[in-house]
């Protein structure tokens, strides 16, 4: 009597010991990753990353306040890292004002200087309203971010026959190359361009970290948090007073 082969139906998606054996020998393909497992892994990675970076952006006072919550050695290591960052920033903070530059100085003061820091150039035109606005903003930014070099040179002196209509022009140099160029302030806010618009450019090009507390948007966040804190305190005081009144009523 001949042996008859019985065909077995195998569901390759089933998680069984038999299927594991078949997968091991390449009879059926590996199971695709579960969307749920992938989501759980992504969430776990996000939690781990958030925990690992929990001290990023905190100043020394905030780090001191965490002494009872964090491992002493780890916190000390992180404080030393912040101190080094502050020291490096202090050493780099050698500018702090807008430097007028002539054409013969262009290579030394701008192109070569960009090997050490970002150099932000304003090709100016005194008769241009936007150029005068940018000059004022340039001074504020230079004082606020003294590790960056801000310079000013009339457009016609920097480039022969440079069109007045192109002024103001912003050129940003790093490592000898132009990494950002803006012709007039049209792409920012036009005649309404403000510090926040220019700070966004600084963050976009990587010259300032988006966590930097000197940024207007971060200062506004802190002011908003303080406003909310004061409002909560006032609300709590009112609530306590109301409770005292109720107690008096029932006495």
Image: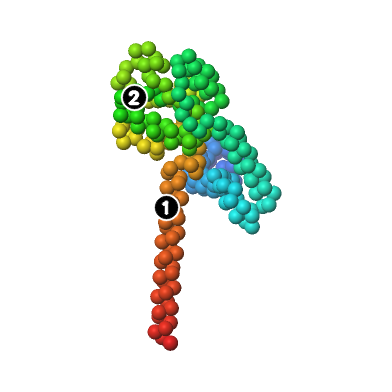
| Placement of 244 over or under 18, stated as above or below | below
| Placement of 236 over or under 56, stated as above or below | below
Q: Is residue 119 left or right of residue 73?
A: left
Dot 2: few (<14), some (14–19), or many (≥20) neighbours within 10 Å? some
Q: Please, which colouring scheme is shown?
A: rainbow
- Pointer 1: what residue? 224
Quadrant including the N terminus: top right
| Placement of 152 over or under 77, stated as above or below | above
Residue 143 shows up from this direction: yes
Closer-to-camera residue (186/162): 162
Residue 25 shows up from this direction: no
Element type at marker 2? loop
| 1 or 2: tag closer to the N-terminus | 2
Residue 173 position, x and y percent, is 48, 23
Q: How many marks?
A: 2
- The residues tagged by marks 1 and 2 sit, at their Cα atoms, a distance apart of 38 Å
Closer-to-camera residue (151/76): 151
Residue 32 position, x and y percent, is 51, 39
Q: Nearer the viewer, mark 1 or mark 2?
A: 2
x 49%, y 44%: residue: 213
x 37%, y 16%: residue: 156
Q: Is residue 69 left or right of residue 135?
A: right
Q: Are marks 1 and 2 in contact (CB under 8 Å)?
A: no
Give residue 150's mark: none
Residue 93 position, x and y percent, is 55, 33
x 47%, y 33%: residue: 142
Dot 1: few (<14), some (14–19), or many (≥20) neighbours within 10 Å? few
| Placement of 115 over or under 18, stated as above or below | above
Residue 168 position, x and y percent, is 35, 25
- Pointer 2: what residue? 126
């Amino acid at each position: 009597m001949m042996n008859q082969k019985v065909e077995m139906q195998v569901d390759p998606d089933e998680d069984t010991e038999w299927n594991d054996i078949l997968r091991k020998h390449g009879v059926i393909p590996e199971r695709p990753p579960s969307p749920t497992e992938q989501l759980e892994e992504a969430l776990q990675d996000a939690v781990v990353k958030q925990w690992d970076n929990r001290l990023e952006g905190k100043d020394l006072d905030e780090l001191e306040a965490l002494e009872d919550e964090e491992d002493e050695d780890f916190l000390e290591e992180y404080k030393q890292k912040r101190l080094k960052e502050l020291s490096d920033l202090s050493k780099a903070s050698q500018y702090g004002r807008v430097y007028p530059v002539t054409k013969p100085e262009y290579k030394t003061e701008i192109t070569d200087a960009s090997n050490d820091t970002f150099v932000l150039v304003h090709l100016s035109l005194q008769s241009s309203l936007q150029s005068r606005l940018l000059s004022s903003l340039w001074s504020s930014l230079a004082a606020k971010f003294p590790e960056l070099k801000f310079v000013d040179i009339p457009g016609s002196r920097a480039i022969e026959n440079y069109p007045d209509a192109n002024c103001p022009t912003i050129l940003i140099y790093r490592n000898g190359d132009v990494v950002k160029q803006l012709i007039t302030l049209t792409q920012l806010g036009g005649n309404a361009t403000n510090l926040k618009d220019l700070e966004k450019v600084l963050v976009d090009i990587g010259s300032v970290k988006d966590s930097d507390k000197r940024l207007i948007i971060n200062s506004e966040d802190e002011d908003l948090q303080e406003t909310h804190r004061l409002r909560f305190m006032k609300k709590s005081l009112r609530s306590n007073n109301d409770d005292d009144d109720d107690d008096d009523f029932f006495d």
